[in-house]
Image (cartoon, coloured by chain):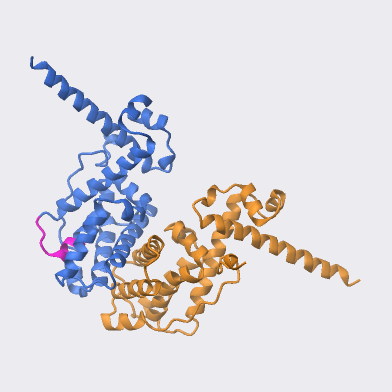
Chain colours: A orange, B blue
């Protein structure tokens, strides 16, 4: 009599596991030169499921890629919140967010590569990173803590651009130091947003809470340890 | 006896004209969603020449697209120099360069769209814009006029990113004011590079020399006037 619910749970767990593997496969391709050119067959093979199973979860490969991007950005948003869990100062929140986004390149290489390749498109489609950045900048302006050089959209465009530019710098030259680059980027943006040099240097070099490995497909790539 | 050189000249002029039309066709595609997916047949048809003629000028379509990108960036570099012909202050040179690059969206829409779609790739392949920006920032730092928040590469990445971010903002919302956005972007970057707010506001709002229409394929799009 009690076996039906247990079987339901097992079925649900298996379904969730399959979905996660499909999203992980899509993330792998999005982080590579293949990108969205990967076929349904390639995606299913990489997730080790049949093509029919893929269609049981997603209407088509575009829906799967959309879910993969959303999952990546959600993870980044969660990391962003994690680093700032105990921070009240809107200027420090902003500096930490900039640095954390750049440092995810070290701990979450695949997801960071997806963000870099997505480029400014994430500003339009993102429901995780961009709204957090906008809300943070707006709160910092409203409190008088930051002084934006133009309207909110321009400030967001400059912030997103500086971060993407530094992600490209890190991707193009492995000898570039991620910590130094992340702190310089945050320092520059804090100065752009009206802080004096001393305070901007202080806020952009404070110890940063370590981002815990993600639990989803965009977490640390552990396959090389297998 | 004098007809041979005249005929040579005519031949050379015709060859240059054909090459310019091929580059203009490639620029048209690069500024559109088709991009480098345009076929040799499409490129030749758009330039109103035969496919054999195209191959008489370029080894393949990639060589033609490379020439189109180089031509676009060369034009932008020339516009950059034009705006700054009489400027000696490295900080004003920098501010004018930032504003001019953004304002080319108004006068050189196609070329500006190519730059936006090229994204950060232009930092790696560009022999016109990026070296000018790097030399300008380096001179400004050496003179003590600007104070970069990190090394030169990080400063360049933040500058390129802020400009590309604002180009995306202008492309995504036609109601955004290009002049205001260009001035805000320059103001923000001058503050990032150590100028105080008053001076940064002054330098980023000075009257700007008007960029003359380009003479090449990436100049103002006049086809709508035909």
Q: Which image quadrant for residue B49?
A: top left
Instruction: Tell me the residue at 34%/61% (across/down).
Output: B161
Residue A108 horizontal/vertical position (percent): 51, 68
Residue B134 horizontal/vertical position (percent): 23, 60
Q: Is residue B110 magenta?
A: no
Q: Is residue B92 magenta?
A: yes
**Left or right of A134 on screen, residue B170:** left
- Judged from this view, the residue extending furthest toward the top is B1
Task: In this rendered view, identify the residue nearer to me: A125 or B4.
Answer: B4
The answer to whether residue B50 is visible is no
Q: Main secondary structure of the magenta part?
A: helix
Residue A29 horizontal/vertical position (percent): 55, 55
Q: Quadrant of the C terminus of chain A?
A: bottom right
Instruction: Tell me the residue at 30%/83% (across/down).
Output: A199
Range drawn in magenta: B86-95
- Judged from this view, the residue extending furthest toward the right is A1
Q: Is residue A27 above or below residue B118?
A: below
Task: In this rendered view, identify the residue nearer to me: B41 or B207.
Answer: B41
Residue B57 horizontal/vertical position (percent): 30, 31
Q: Which image quadrant for residue A144?
A: bottom left
Instruction: Tell me the residue at 28%/56% (across/down).
Output: B178
The answer to whether residue A40 is visible is yes
Q: Is residue A20 above or below residue B13?
A: below
**Left or right of A119 on screen, residue B190:** left
């Amino acid at each position: 009599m009690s076996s039906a619910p247990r079987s339901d749970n097992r079925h649900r767990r298996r379904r969730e596991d399959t979905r996660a593997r499909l999203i992980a496969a899509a993330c792998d391709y999005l982080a590579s030169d293949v990108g969205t050119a990967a076929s349904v067959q390639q995606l299913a093979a990489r997730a080790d499921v049949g093509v029919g199973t893929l269609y049981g979860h997603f209407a088509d490969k575009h829906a799967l890629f959309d879910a993969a991007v959303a999952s990546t950005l959600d993870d980044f948003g969660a990391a962003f919140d994690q680093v700032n869990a105990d921070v009240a100062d809107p200027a420090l929140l902003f500096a930490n967010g900039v640095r954390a986004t750049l440092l995810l390149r070290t701990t979450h290489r695949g997801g960071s590569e997806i963000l870099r390749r997505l480029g400014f498109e994430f500003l339009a489609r993102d429901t995780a990173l961009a709204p957090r950045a906008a809300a943070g900048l707006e709160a910092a302006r409203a409190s008088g803590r930051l002084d934006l050089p133009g309207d909110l959209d321009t400030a967001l465009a400059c912030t997103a651009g500086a971060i993407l530019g530094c992600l490209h710098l890190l991707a193009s030259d492995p000898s570039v130091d991620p910590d130094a680059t992340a702190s310089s980027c945050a320092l520059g943006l804090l100065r752009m947003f009206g802080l004096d040099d001393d305070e901007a240097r202080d806020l952009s070099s404070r110890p940063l809470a370590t981002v815990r490995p993600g639990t989803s497909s965009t977490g640390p790539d552990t396959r090389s340890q297998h």
